[in-house]
Image: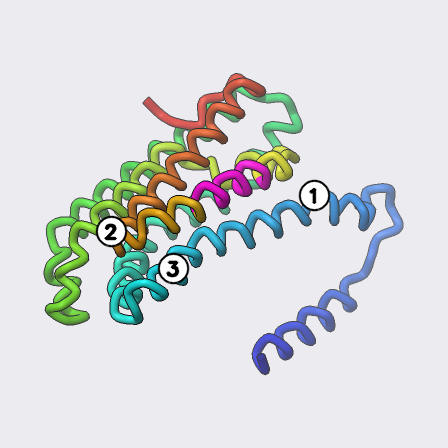
Amino acid sequence: MVLAAISFILIFYFLNRIKTSNTNENVPVKEIVRLSLPMGVSNVIMYLLLSIDIFILKKYFGNQAVAHYSVALKIITILSMIILSATINISPKISELYNSKKFLELEALCRKTAKIIFSVNVVISVLLGLFIKQVLLFFGPEYLAIQNVFFVLLFSQLFCSVFGVVPVYLNMTERSRIFQKILLITLSINTALNCILIPLYGAMGAAIVFTSSVVFWNICVVIYVYKKDRIKLYFN
């Protein structure tokens, strides 16, 4: 709480020191809110998608099961960071090309980025797969029980890698509300499936639901973008 308060004060201080321009290029506050609010809601939904399974798993199987599952999630975060780093770097370019109606260049950029992300994550996945026992033993012998859970979660991130820029494309093309609606549907499905599968299969059920949710919303975005923009976000 103290760090949050200090951060808020510093951000407020530096924002007030920024000189505002009187040119016609100023963006109205309502426009900023209109574009950013759905993105904020989407981030909250993403957080819930990563949290609901933890809460349900703890309810039925206790803290030890949560600890095991959380370790598997943290390991695959390495792949998530590759996706995040790449998409953040090209986000402004996506917006620029889309607004300039340069759709051929935009598709080439998206597909090239997806190929790079997938190539890097395949290498990392192979290394993790080869040495996963050693990695899990670092946390304790009992963590070897989540090997299969890890491989299910690993598949989810490899699947994301194929589609590369899916997490940011709709946000950068002023259709964040569409992305928000897709995530809301995903959250509903995710919650229902978690309530069914986790009591039956524990951490493996949580991993299956997580992977299914990732596959679902990625495919929804890809289909929507192709229908509306005729752009393939994946490489082949």
Counting residues from the start of the chain, the first of labels 2 and 3 encountered is 3
At horizontal 50% and vertical 20% (from top left) the residue drawn is 226
Q: Is residue 1 visible?
A: yes
Q: Which residues are magenta?
A: 180-190
Could you tell me how far apart the alpha carbons at marks 2 and 1 are, in whole angstroms? Answer: 40 Å
Q: Is residue 185 magenta?
A: yes
- Name the image colouring: rainbow
Chief SS of the magenta region: helix
Residue identified by numbered label 3: 56
Residue at 54%, 36% in the rendered image: 182
Q: Which residue is mark 2?
A: 201
- 208 left or right of 83? left
Badge 1 marks a residue whose secondary structure is helix
Assess whether residue 169 is covered by the magenta stretch: no
Residue at 30% across, 65% down: 66
Q: Is residue 26 above or below residue 116?
A: below
* Label whose residue precedes the other's in the sequence (2 or 1): 1
Name the residue: 13% across, 68% down. Answer: 142
Q: Position of residue 117 (x, y in %)?
A: 35, 39
Rendered position, 226 above or below 123: above
Of badges 2 and 1, nearer the viewer stands: 2
Measured as percent of width and height from the top left, residue 24 is found at 86, 42
Most foreground residue, 18 or 236: 236
